[in-house]
Image: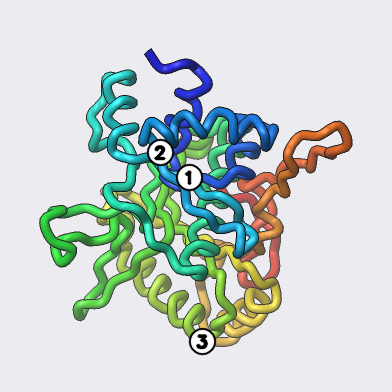
Amino acid sequence: MISSKKGSFLITLAKYKFITRKQFARLGVEKHNSAITKHCQPLLEADWIGVMDATNYGIGHVYYLKRKGALILSKELKTDIDRINFCINKPRLSSQTLFHRTAAIDCQIELFTSCAENDTQVIFYDRDIEVIGSLKGDQNLIRKTRIELPNGRYLEPDAIFMLDTSKGKKLFCLEFENEDYTKKSYQKIEKHVHALNIKSPSKKYKHNKAHKTLFVYKNPSTMESIMVKVKENISGIGNWFLFKTYDEVYTPVAFKTPTSKTQKPRNFLTGWRTVIGEVEPLY
């Protein structure tokens, strides 16, 4: 039998795959830094979880679920291990990947938190860090979010998710832009416009309506440049493309201390901008 506290750490890792200490705090798993150390150490010693030291990048320790922990959790929850996110091998992530992946998971956390607070169900949340296919060879694996386009092209958004809202089921693609590559980001938008026009994501997920694409930018200046360029060159996208900065999505987290102050949580579902600057809700 897994204790409730150990179980909460394992279940969180099974859901998100990679979690930092501050993300544990944001999710309310444990708000004290010292307590995270206390609870994670036995799990590390039991080889149920692993950890990457990303303190040199200002990210801190990044935890992940290992196969042994996934097996224990699958028995405890009476669920198939294939439904649990765990790492088969020790991750080897570059600084660029660490920054991008951590912030993309921040976006996921804020979406899930906002949905829970607004009685909106997340039907599914597929991510590019998950793959499908045979594990016998990397050549047989493709990212779960791959969207096929004509002429052998494809898109692989950071996430594709569906919400069950008061206005019906809504499908979304999410792109987190960590770099300042305006040209590359604009080309990605062009591909997303094509995908919207031929309804590729909707066909993939058997959704009978068009989807919306969300772009979250780490650098506000890059976002503004992209929005100007899209406005000048692409017409008719209305509110099918929505934009936010990372700081508008991410709720700053501080570990609980006698002097710590709680930041007002961001609302992922509101405050999105269209390409012409109008502010709209997500749905």
Whole-Å distance between the Cαs marked 1 and 3?
34 Å
Q: Secondary structure at mark 1?
A: strand
Vertical side of 73 occupied by 22: above or below: below
Q: Earlier in the sequence, mark 2 or mark 1?
A: 2
The residue that disc 1 covers is 63
Vertically, is 241 above or below 210?
below
Q: Residue furthest right?
A: 259
> Which numbered disc, 1 or 3, marks the residue that appears first in the sequence?
1
Residue 262: x and y in percent read: 80, 38
Q: Of residues 46 and 71, which is closer to you in this image?
A: 46
Please report contact status of discs 2 and 1: CB closer than 8 Å, yes or no: yes
User: The disc labelled 2 sits on which kind of residue?
Assistant: Ile
The residue indicated by pointer 3 is: 183
Q: Which residue is mark 2?
A: 49
State left or right for residue 162 relative to residue 279: left
205 above or below 96?
above
Kind of residue indicated by mark 3: Lys
Q: CA distance from mark 2 to mark 3?
A: 39 Å
Mark 3 closeness class: few <14, some 14–19, many ≥20 residues within 10 Å:
few
Please give left or right for residue 265 compared with residue 99 in the image.
Answer: right
The reply to whether discs 1 and 3 touch (Cβ–Cβ < 8 Å) is no
Q: Quadrant of residue 39?
A: top right
Q: Residue at x 29, y 52 (%)?
A: 89
- Relative vertical location of residue 162 with respect to residue 184 in this rendering, above or below: above
Q: Give residue 77's quadrant in the image.
A: top left
